[in-house]
Image (cartoon, rainbow, N blue to C red):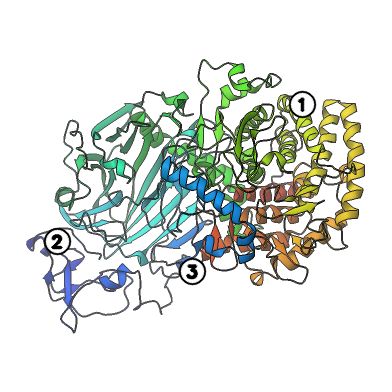
Amino acid sequence: MERGLGAVTEGEWQQPGQAYAHGEVRESPSSRQSTQACTGVRDSRGLAHTRTGGGAETALCTLCLCTQTDRQTQTHTPRDTHTPRHTHAAAGPLVRRYEGAARGRGVAAAGWRVCLAHRFEEPRQPYGAGDVPFHDVLRHIGLALRYFRWWYKKTRIEKKSAFIDLLCAVPLQQIYGCPLGGIGGGTITRGWRGEFCRWQLNPGIYHYETVIANQFTVCLRCKGQTVYQQVLSVERPSTLQGWNWGYCGHYAFYHALYPRAWMVYELPGQNVVLTCRQVSPVIPHDYKDSSLPVGVFIWEVENGKDEDVDVSIMFSLQNGTGTKEDRSGGHWNEPFAFEKDGERVAGVLLHHCTRVNPFTLAISAREKAGTGVTHLTAFNPTGSGREVWQDLLQDGRLDSPAGKSSLTEKGEVTAAAVCASCRVPARGHRTLELALAWDMPRVYFGSKEKLHLRRYTRFFGSGGDAAPALSHHALTHYEEWERKIEAWQKPILENSQLPSWYKSALFNELYFVTDGGTIWVELPPDCHAEDLQGPAGAGLSHLLPVLREYGRFAYLEGQEYRMYNTYDVHFYASFALVMLWPKLQISLQYDIAVTVVNEDVQPRQYLMCGQTAQVKLKNVVPHDIGDPGDEPWQRVNAYLMHDTADWKDLNLKFVLQVYRDYYLTRDSLYLRDMWPVCQAVMESELKFDMDNDGLIENGGFADQTYDAWVVNGASAYCGGLWLAAVCVMCKMAEVLGDAEIQQKYTDILSKGKEAFERMLWNGKYYNYDSSGSDTSSSIMSDQCAGQWFLGACGLDQGEFEVFPKSHVVSALKTIFEKNVMSFAGGTMGAVNGMRPDGVPDTSSVQSNEVWIGVVYALAATMIQEGLVEEGFRTAEGCYRTVWERLGMAFQTPEAYREKKVYRSLAYMRPLSIWSMQLALERRASRAPAPVQSPQPSVPPENASVGRMALD
């Protein structure tokens, strides 16, 4: 319940200007209905109550006049029938419950906006055993038994996490907002209601804990009296009950445009509006500040009163991440101040002293003229919190005790708070700046074999004492970060031809670059080339210089699918990296190249078929570079389902990315290093051309990224990728002057194109495969993947045209008609497989799913081929479904079905939306520029792409 004060005495309630006066509830400025007056009954913290007809006491909310019971369930019956007075914030489906008048200060026009009172009405369940069709159960009974034996040993005996846990999926929580932090230093996600609720500090390991003590609280004082004090949270927790909880969500909204977010709060009866702007240093083409584990909160305070108001923002934080380790004992807090170049920052350090991967959290505020910073070194977040509340209530400041706190006892939890205060003049505006930083510089993965130093230690040291300097840097550089972010985003945001949902999707899907369990580490100073190359990697002459300069980068296939740099999926997601942080893509490719030319002969059983084979064959691309629960880079191929040495797509995807990267970066040293590796993997791939017709054949099992969808013989997906890879081999050979290899692959391409058309083209689209099975004529949404990549490389026309343009356009139109418009009324994107009669292909668990990342790639292909409207319509269905209907913001899954289920939250593949942007930029570069107002276009072939207004 909203009230003016916290735990106050009866006498204090008679101060002028308070939210409650005796015997009445004062309306907020936008209240439009009357209510019976309060009887004056108050609880122990000064809450006003009224008597209902049955004699029960019900707390009243000053802001919207709904009962406490209603607000606990976020219902708002008295006013839901009213049209909001201000439609500027109610333009989207998620802000219909917003009843405030405030627009906020500096809030972006484009982005994802949601009212804090919103409820997502459609609950979805993770795909589970009960969703497997009976015919699939019978077909995969051996897999089920093998998987359960392996899962039981891993999780119950070894006490480790499964790389894919099919039995204990992460439940859907429709709560997440923009993650805090740069790339590779860990992330802390703040939900759209303001909660700190998802934690990834240990690399690749997630905890989904809402830590209730982590809050912002506002205190307003007029003429030396506290008139309003409120936790800016809609929650009503069982702890810290001495605090004033239950802010009314109908008068606040959240707006995200990654890497920034805004929260706008109207304060009831106070004529004060708060806008909290959250900024993380995620800056394209920046390899320093983008690595920093920090987030900044800029509080814009607008005073609509005719008198000055003293405003304080208190930031409280628990020492830890909400797990049992918070109670392990030995943790402690201490105040700090850090001054440099005339700028002073002060706050509290919270030292979390675990045996493995200890870290320090820092909450701080920027001191400047007119702004005071105070702190509370330690308090108990499991108690009532009354002493903290009263401390702030008394004078809008905290006591700022000197010295360190004592070490926590086992079972004890501690927290701290920092408070920034200023006077806001009548009808004026002021800014308060606070920051959160965390310093876990030295990390071990699950095996604890090797010590790794995070990227940011290059700039801030690895001693574990960098939190003050990180805090200072963040608070004194965030304005520069924002200028760069705005310069990068502005050309896209100001392009009136682009739909607003696309602008939101394009930037907000980038969250996964930082929040994909991402790790970015330095090479050890004493590292030598032979340490990286293994026995067979001596040909990679620039491996060591690249990794020394830019470090090693890895991100998970998904927060639930714990494999780093899963390569068949990275193929789709890689557009975000190569367009925005190309050096990270180059670094990742070098790591893959090293594993290609080496092998791991250790035998193991594969769960799908039950056969035993070695972990990694030489001269084939790995599935992934390891599990964060083990030792990534050292032991690759954490994926146990299939022996991916027999997969048909991995080698091809490496070759395609090598040329795409060269085309966009013009890094000729990289191309020369990768050329022998490309030849090696293509030689390995040639063995899959069983009949020497220039076209590879699939092996009658799920031998590609669709790892539960069987494919046999020539196929549209793998066959198309094969021909595209053969084409880029020809092009790379031409660039490098290798006439012999160029002729070899030119001959293969000529034969393969003819075979592909003859075996798969049916007059309207390419058949799923050539097996002649009941589903071989299915319409696969991803059948043009090869053409998609060729288009991104500028090889989709002229002498390098592989697929007849008329066939490509016909196939895309068929996909749009069948997979998009005939599925869920055209509102959910493209289903993976559709039968020619307009019924989804149910032959596998994946054929009747929608894969969001595949849909974005399909949309990019449509745009490349001139079907721009169809491309946007196709992709829009996924965005609306994920972000607006299912409440999966900042956790876009791999897949969903038309009804009921989803699979694998927070997944890598949707980063493929950046291929849509590349397609749009390429189209703009080919279009004649207007004479009077030329628009920015894609740079020519000899320049990097994706730098639209930055470099």
Q: Give the quadrant of residue 236.
A: bottom left
Cα–Cα gap, marks 1 and 3: 51 Å
Q: Which element type, helix, strand or loop, lies under badge 3?
A: loop
| Residue 526, position as x, y percentages in the image | 52, 15
The residue carrying mark 1 is 676
Instruction: Please give left or right for residue 460 compared with residue 419 in the image.
Output: right
Of all residues, the one furthest to the left in this rendering is 11
Cα–Cα gap, marks 2 and 1: 73 Å
Of all residues, the one furthest to the bottom in this rendering is 53
Q: Which element type, helix, strand or loop, lies under badge 1?
A: helix
The residue carrying mark 2 is 45
The residue carrying mark 3 is 122
Is the residue under label 1 in contact with that under label 2 (CB below 8 Å)? no
Label 3 is placed on what type of residue? Glu
Instruction: Please give left or right for residue 348 compared with residue 83 in the image.
Output: left
Q: Earlier in the sequence, mark 3 or mark 2?
A: 2
